[in-house]
Image: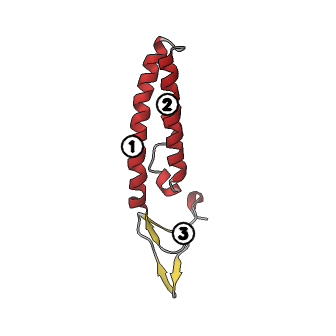
């Protein structure tokens, strides 16, 4: 184990030659995967949901601040919960390498 509790990656050997993945790539056991390209897809999808959640947060505060029992408040909270569930699904679908590039689900509540 290295300093700070980190473990150095094990070099990949192919026919006796060491193969290294670039800084934006990870070894999946068969080949280097470009995490930048993979993560861009998740980042784009996440950005749409994050924008929706931020807009819903404002709408919920406005509607529920005026009347917490109103139908508008109830409907907006339901929309907010649905968007949060979609974001959590996206978060769980993304690889760990990509999750580090996305907003933490807890920060969007």
Q: Is residue 10 above or below residue 108?
A: below
- Seen at 57% across and 61% down, the residue is 6
| Residue at the spot of label 3 | 9
Q: How is the image coloured?
A: secondary structure
Report the quarter where the N terminus lies.
bottom right
Of residue 60 and residue 13, the one placed in the foreground of this image is 60
Calculate the distance from the C-alpha at mark 3 to the C-alpha at mark 2: 40 Å
Q: Which mark is residue 97?
A: none
Viewer can see residue 89: yes
Of residue 50 and residue 104, the one placed in the foreground of this image is 50
- Seen at 48% across and 74% down, the residue is 31
Calculate the distance from the C-alpha at mark 3 to the C-alpha at mark 1: 31 Å
- Seen at 48% across and 81% down, the residue is 18
Instruction: Return the x and y of residue 49 as percentages of the image width and height.
Output: 43, 40
Instruction: Return the x and y of residue 26 as percentages of the image width and height.
Output: 48, 66
Which residue is most to the bottom?
15
**Crowding near the residue tagged with mark 1, few <14, some 14–19, many ≥20 C-alpha atoms within 10 Å:** some
In this figure, what is the number of numbered marks?
Answer: 3
Q: Is residue 106 above or below residue 32?
A: above
User: Contact, CB < 8 Å: mark 2 with mark 1?
Assistant: no
Q: Which mark is residue 80?
A: 2
- Seen at 49% across and 30% down, the residue is 79
Q: Which mark is residue 47?
A: 1
**Crowding near the residue tagged with mark 3, few <14, some 14–19, many ≥20 C-alpha atoms within 10 Å:** few
Q: Nearer the viewer, mark 3 or mark 2?
A: 2
- Tell which circle, 3 or 2, labels the residue nearer the N-terminal end: 3
Q: At numbered mark 3, what does the secondary structure look like: helix, strand or loop?
A: loop
**Crowding near the residue tagged with mark 2, few <14, some 14–19, many ≥20 C-alpha atoms within 10 Å:** many
Of residue 60 and residue 71, the one placed in the foreground of this image is 71
Q: At numbered mark 1, what does the secondary structure look like: helix, strand or loop?
A: helix
């Amino acid at each position: 184990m290295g300093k700070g509790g980190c473990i150095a990656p094990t070099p990949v050997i192919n026919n006796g030659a060491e193969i290294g993945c670039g800084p934006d790539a990870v070894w999946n056991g068969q080949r280097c995967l470009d995490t930048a390209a993979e993560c861009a897809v998740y980042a784009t999808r996440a950005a749409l949901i994050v924008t929706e959640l931020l807009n819903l947060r404002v709408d919920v505060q406005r509607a529920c601040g005026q009347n917490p029992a109103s139908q508008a408040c109830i409907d907006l909270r339901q929309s907010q919960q649905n968007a949060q569930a979609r974001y959590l699904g996206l978060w769980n679908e993304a690889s760990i390498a990509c999750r580090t590039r996305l907003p933490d689900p807890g920060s969007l509540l």
